[in-house]
Image (cartoon, rainbow, N blue to C red):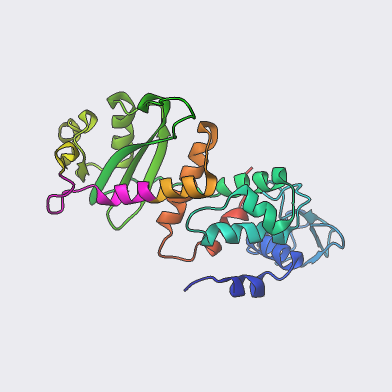
Amino acid sequence: MKFTIKHFSERFPDDDSCLDYMFEQAYGSMPACPKCDIVEPSYYRVRNRKCYECKDCGNQLHPLANTIFHKSSTSLRDWFYVIYLFSVAKNGVSAKEIERHLGVTYKTAWRIAKQVRALMLQGTSPLSGIVETDETYIGGKQRGKDVSVQDKAVVFGIVERGGNVKVEHVRSAGARVLLPRLQTNIAPGTTVYSDQAQVYRSLHRVGYYHDSVNHSAGEYGRGIVHTNTIEGFWGQLKRSIDGTYHCVSRKYLQLYLNEFVYRYNHRTDPVFPVLIASASRRVR
């Protein structure tokens, strides 16, 4: 089932409904008041404050504390709306777009976008089945300069066919960097397909079945042996960076990679309910 803008407007029409949601997510299952130990405590909203107070002892709970919304003067509903935009945007959401939507400063829009991306974490479970692996390079030519591969950011990725993808900004594409990551993120005994880069030629010696395609000879698929899935992900990633963000610094590149990985890994489900639930957890 899709979560549309109509669903969003009905579920979160104002700041109060957003704050009630945060309180329910953080404290809805609390069996007793942490101060007076009253079972099934009753809390009421404190007027003009973003907190709730116990009717029996006056203990106050702050559902926004230590979350991405902590001490933010921006409307809570505006935060929720930006999270919704991230959940439905296939090619990402730039800070300038957020600035136009909310009527805030660019500095505020950039900070909101950065905090939302911090919610979009990659999974930790190793991939299995049939896995494709590849590396790519992010960065364009500077005007008047010939930029070599070494000047670009190296991005390493693995994808499970029909499953999840994992992507990481790494310092190089050498064996010392990539092999430990392959062994950490791919279950032993998995079938791994790659191109003919030197780093992958030892995979069969560390517990994997490995085969490759020879791109330099014009071979891009041999039956089920191909890397088209990960190549497709690279294509979407690069088109989005070029068209939406235009330029991404190395310092924040991993945050942007996490964003596209998160969206890919939740491609069969409505992203907004999952993402907004993550925002209600303590992340700071």
Q: Position of residue 184 (x, y in %)?
A: 33, 37
Over which residues does the magenta segment extend?
Answer: 219-235
Q: Position of residue 223 (x, y in %)?
A: 12, 54
Q: Is residue 144 magenta?
A: no
Q: Residue at x 65, y 60 (%)?
A: 80
In the picture provided, is 98 more to the left or to the right than 261?
Answer: right
User: Closer to the camera, 26 or 104?
Assistant: 104
- Considering every residue shown, the one lying at the far right of the view is 47
Q: Residue at x 16, y 42 (%)?
A: 218
Count of marks placed on residues: 0
Q: Position of residue 67 (x, y in %)?
A: 66, 49
If the image is split into quadrants, where does the C terminus sit?
top right
User: Closer to the camera, 151 or 172?
Assistant: 151
Q: Quadrant for residue 19, please give it.
A: bottom right
Q: Residue at x 30, y 25 (%)?
A: 174
Q: Is residue 32 visible?
A: no
Q: Residue at x 72, y 48 (%)?
A: 70
Q: Quadrant for residue 190, please give it.
A: top left
Q: Position of residue 262 (x, y in %)?
A: 46, 52
Where 174 sits versus 51, above or below?
A: above
